[in-house]
Amino acid sequence: MIQRTFLRPIQAVTRQPQSLRIAPTATSRSSPVVSGITPPASQRLGSRRWYAQAQEAEAKKEGGPAVESHGNASGTQPAAADASKADPSQAELESKKREVIDLTDRLKRSVADYRNLQEQTKREIQASRDFALQRFAKDLLDSIDNLDRALSNVEPSKLDAADANPDLKNLHSGLRMTEQILMGTLKRHGMERFDPAETAEKFDPNRMEATFQAPQQGKEDGTVFYTQSKGYTLNGRVLRAAKVGVVKNS
């Protein structure tokens, strides 16, 4: 009796029809499919989630990219897709970078302008120093010209003669020394004198003023042969042009 009581439920199970037996599928390792019986939606969703989590864990172990799990069974985009949106902090960082580049460019331009202003100011100060004596030097030109005329009016033969007047010689010697000291002082301050006739220079309109033209044998046209008044320069700039006579044979 007891054996029959226990064997009947077992025989009832073993005698179930073929359509109710559980058959494992090859495509799913986690959710068994019962032939002829459709599992409920909650069970399908749970099996999908478990399968996605298993794939993600396996990908992490292998070092590959994690598999995104679906949030629901309807196929909508998961919450992780929101990461593709623009990050406000990244946009703010890019804006600050552009601002820094713009400010750096402005700073460099300001520094360059300031250095140019410094160089220009130095040049102007140096020019003011170089030509501060220009008006005073022009006022001295008449006195220098008169001193030069006094020395040139004494002929060298009168000074070298045996019966030359000693007072004249002493006066001429004193005037010559005064002229040398004066011209040396002016040269130290940038003022120099030039005589185009001494070196037979070509006429230069930037440094000379032609007062007349005359033919001269054996000399080329345009050559200076006579100096009416000598010229002066101050630190390379013409203070007064030399008045000269120019050769014109043709």
Image (cartoon, rainbow, N blue to C red):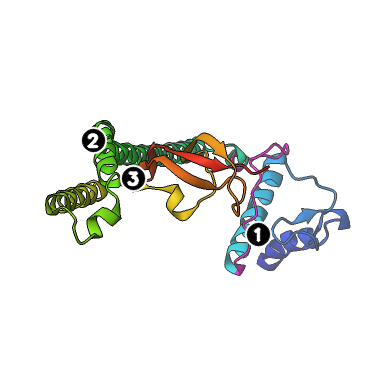
Q: Which amino acid does label 1 sit on?
A: Gln
| Residue wearing tag 3 | 235
SS at badge 3: loop
In reply to whether residue 73 is colored magenta, the answer given is yes
* Secondary structure mainly formed by the magenta segment: loop
Q: Quadrant of residue 63?
A: bottom right
Contact between labelled residues 3 and 2, with CB atoms less than 8 Å apart: no
**Residue 136 falls left or right of residue 106:** left
SS at badge 1: helix
Q: Residue 55 carries which label?
A: 1
In reply to whether residue 172 is colored magenta, the answer given is no
Q: Identify the residue at image location x=51%, y=46%.
A: 224
Q: Which of marks 3 and 1 is nearer the N terminus?
A: 1
Which contiguous range is marked in magenta? 62-80
Viewer-proximal residue among 111 and 82: 111
What is the C-alpha distance between the residues marked 2 and 3?
20 Å
Q: Position of residue 93 (x, y in %)?
A: 47, 40
| Residue wearing tag 2 | 143
Q: Identify the residue at image location x=30%, y=50%.
A: 155
